[in-house]
Amino acid sequence: PDERRFCVFSLTVSLDSREVLGGANDGCLYVFDRERNQRTLKIDAHEDDVNTVAFADASSQILFSGGDDALCKVWDRRTLREDSPQPVGVLAGHRDGVTFIDTKGDARYLISNSKDQSIKLWDVRRFSPKEGLEASRQAVTQQNWDYRWQQVPKRALKKHKLPGDTSVMTYRGHGVLHTLIRCRFSPEFSTGQRYVYTGCSTGKVVVYEVLSGKVVARLNGHRACVRDVHWHPYDGKIVSTSWDGVLGLWQYKQGEFHEGGDPSSDLQGSSPAPLRHRQFETSDPQ
């Protein structure tokens, strides 16, 4: 980094574990080669903090990034010049900063979580026109609240699409406050990637049906903001982590979230966080 005040907000490792991709507060992306133990690429990517980065697929050639400029950008390392970096495309439609990106793993679809209280599904074959970039930039400049400690103002909850928004689907029903809350696709093995799931500032895990956009489950149990959630790729277990100092464990089987047991006591002092189990069932999204 060239700046003295520097912070990496997002890190991810390539599927072959050879590279680390990071995004930082200087608006740049960094690629670090673990075998050579050196930085191999720096991209001046966004006009504001880079909050999230992802490898598009196993090839590690396509990179996704999202930042506080409300934009998601797609980068192809095979055509990228560090001295004059240009994305192969931009995905615009959010009204506020992007907090997280998850890829479906096919280098085609991705989802983005945002401080505008929505998740968007994107197809990289449908990049946004210049009109969309300008609309998102203008929307961001009109945001004068801080999601870290303020409640969402009503004027920020506009539901109509911005001009040039090329997103395939928008999911609403969760809160993005306090921290960079994550969202992800459910695993291929157990669900066929049928769902999108996310943490929530109200202490829930919210599960959406991808095609309909409807909420099919709200997993209650935490007493504070749920920052991250992970669905096991094969076993059907979901683990959530929350600001209440507790890990939540959920079991998914054939469209239902089943009981694991009674809740444990809260975290006390410096002892390890207990694992809290809960039962929930999905509603029919029809």
Image (tube, helix red, strand yellow):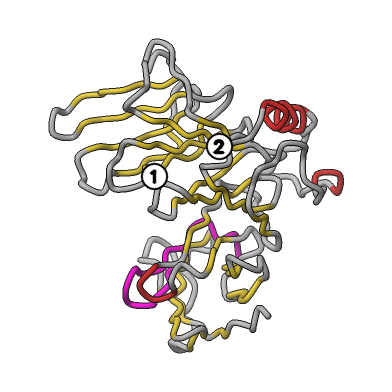
First to last magenta residue range: 223-239
Where 156 falls versus 210 (above or below)? above
Q: Position of residue 248 (x, y in %)?
A: 46, 72
Residue 54 in the magenta stretch? The answer is no
| Mark carried by residue 230 | none
Q: Which residue: 51% across, 32% down?
A: 50
Residue nearest the observer in this picture, 41 or 225: 41
Task: Please determine whether, in this image, residue 179 is positioned above or below residue 21.
Answer: below
Q: As drawn, is 202 to the left or to the right of 246? A: right
Pick whichever, 274 or 129, lies toward us: 129
Residue 261 position by quadrant: bottom left
Quarter of the image for the N terminus: give it: top left
The residue labelled by disc 2 is 72
User: Mark 1: which amino acid?
Assistant: Ala
Q: Is residue 178 above or below residue 247?
A: above
Please give the name of the residue rendered at 38% of the width and 53% of the height, measured from the top-left corner: 105
Question: Counting residues from the N terminus, which is met first, the one under dot 1 or under dot 2?
Answer: 1
Residue that sits furthest to the front in the current view:
125
Which residue lies under the disc numbered 1?
56
Marks 1 and 2, how far apart at CA: 13 Å
